[in-house]
Image (tube, rainbow, N blue to C red):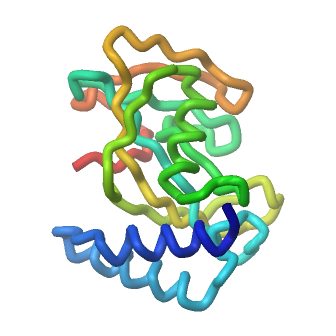
Amino acid sequence: MSAESLHASATELLESWSPSAGSDQSLREAMLAFLGSAPRGCLREHAPGHITASALVFSHDGGEILLTLHPRVGRWIQLGGHCEESDDTVSAAAFREATEESGIAGLRLEPGLYGAQAHPITCSLGRPTRHLDLLFRITAPPGAVPIRSAESTDLRWWPVDALPADADVLLR
């Protein structure tokens, strides 16, 4: 439970990830280079940019995805957020964020990295930075009903083939 364990888990996830798209391979290499130069790069205190933990929460049958209308971003996005020093790994941070933001008990984290994204953003630091999202697939139990948290303007299930036009979600 430290910046070091988060850093080690992010590095291990990226090293073991084998993306098929060339752009994902470039992003993987850029994130590994970033981690190589930023020992505390998994924490929001690293102002130039930081690793964040994102959760793609799918319905039990994979037909829907849970999205949040983020108050700061103003668009529908996946759940997730900053890693905390109390998180053992980046995947644990994604699971914590998914549970907190969805209010759903019994979520199941699938092993490995689902994908990665990079976003310029003004987050809680109050100045422009870059979020380097590590994405994890999480499956909700049958009949899961989300409960909106204070971190969301709205929270709802969307069919994976009918996402909002302005959604910023990576689906494979």
Residue at horizontal 45 percent and vertical 82 percent from the top: 32
Q: Residue furthest left?
A: 20
Residue 6 sits in which quadrant? bottom right
Residue 39 sits in which quadrant? bottom right
Whole-percent x and y of residue 20?
A: 16, 68
Q: Nearer the viewer, residue 98 or 156?
A: 98
Instruction: Assign the N terminus to one quadrant of the image.
Output: bottom right
Residue 15 sits in which quadrant? bottom left
147 to the left or right of 22: right
Residue at horizontal 32 percent and vertical 44 percent from the top: 110
Whole-percent x and y of residue 102?
A: 55, 25
Whole-percent x and y of residue 69?
A: 57, 31
133 to the left or right of 149: left
Vertically, is 45 above or below 166?
below
11 to the left or right of 141: right
Residue at horizontal 57 percent and vertical 66 percent from the top: 51
Q: How many marks?
A: 0
Vertically, is 161 above or below 127?
above
Whole-percent x and y of residue 154?
A: 59, 22
Q: Nearer the viewer, residue 108 or 57?
A: 108
Q: Can the viewer see residue 35?
A: yes
Residue at horizontal 23 percent and vertical 28 percent from the top: 62
Q: Nearer the viewer, residue 117 or 88?
A: 88
Vertically, is 52 above or below 163?
below
Q: Can the viewer see residue 164?
A: no
138 to the left or right of 127: left
